[in-house]
Amino acid sequence: MLSALLAFAFVATVTPGPNNLMLMTSGANFGFRRTLPHMLGIVGGVSIMALLVGAGLMALFDAVPALNLVLKVVSVGYLLWLAFKIGTAAPVEERDADNHPMTVLQAATFQWVNPKAWAMCLSAITLYAPDRSLLSVAIVSGAFAVVCFPAISVWAWLGTFVRQWLSNEAKLRVFNITMAALLVASLYPVLGLGS
């Protein structure tokens, strides 16, 4: 059961989604080292979210179905805003001193409006902690804490890899617009358009 949980957590965190697309963009724009706080925030945010979802938030969403719609609207709105910011980002040398990669706290907080993070946590609790005991919920949370960093590191590294290719301002703009479009496209399953 533990190996299945670890495999689930790895696949869920390594596959494309808002976090990974933003990490690739951050790696390309700021480099791997400056993207580390963003990665650590994702690891902490997803792990804490899994713990809190299993400890009671799941029951709240079951009891008040309207919260699902509110979460979906807020999530979609925020992701569209992020896509706009990514798509219109200036090259690093043109930015003022206020522009920087996400901080640990920003990335951790982002998980609460990240539809994929919600889907991962809800699915993991349903499948691997159906009794919602504190121990089983803590094991799910711990599994995400263990596998998330190696899984998402790949995306930040890919961003740094393409960074050399993106030294040209026009190529960087195309990359940022493409990543913004992919971020918007990641909303497709969230909106239920595939059904």
Image (tube, rainbow, N blue to C red):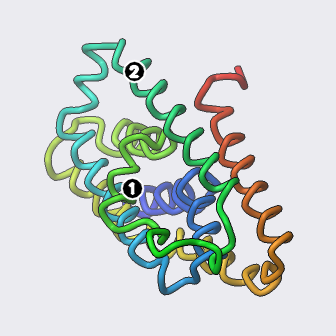
Give SS at disc 1: loop
Q: Between marks 1 and 2, how big is the CA–CA gap?
A: 34 Å
Q: Earlier in the sequence, mark 1 or mark 2?
A: 1
Q: Which residue is drawn at 62% across and 80% down?
A: 157
Q: Residue at x 64, y 80 (%)?
A: 93
Q: Residue at x 45, y 46 (%)?
A: 117
Query: Which one is in front, 164 or 144?
Result: 164
Query: Which one is in front, 84 or 50?
Result: 84
Within-10-Å neighbours for mark 1: few <14, some 14–19, many 20+: few
Q: In which quarter of the image is residue 21?
A: bottom right
Within-10-Å neighbours for mark 2: few <14, some 14–19, many 20+: few
The numbered disc on residue 136 is none
Along the horizontal axis of the image, is 182 left or right of 99? Answer: right
> Vertical placement of 36 versus 83: above or below?
below
- Camera-side mark, 1 or 2: 2
Give SS at disc 2: helix
Residue 111 lies, in percent from the top left, at: 39, 49
- Look at label 1 and name its amino acid: Met
Residue 56 lies, in percent from the top left, at: 18, 33
Quarter of the image with the N terminus is bottom left
Residue 42 lies, in percent from the top left, at: 40, 62
On the image, numbered disc 1 is attached to which residue? 1
> Vertical placement of 93 versus 74: above or below?
below
Query: Which one is in front, 136 or 188?
Result: 188
Along the horizontal axis of the image, is 116 left or right of 17? Answer: left
On the image, numbered disc 2 is attached to which residue? 70
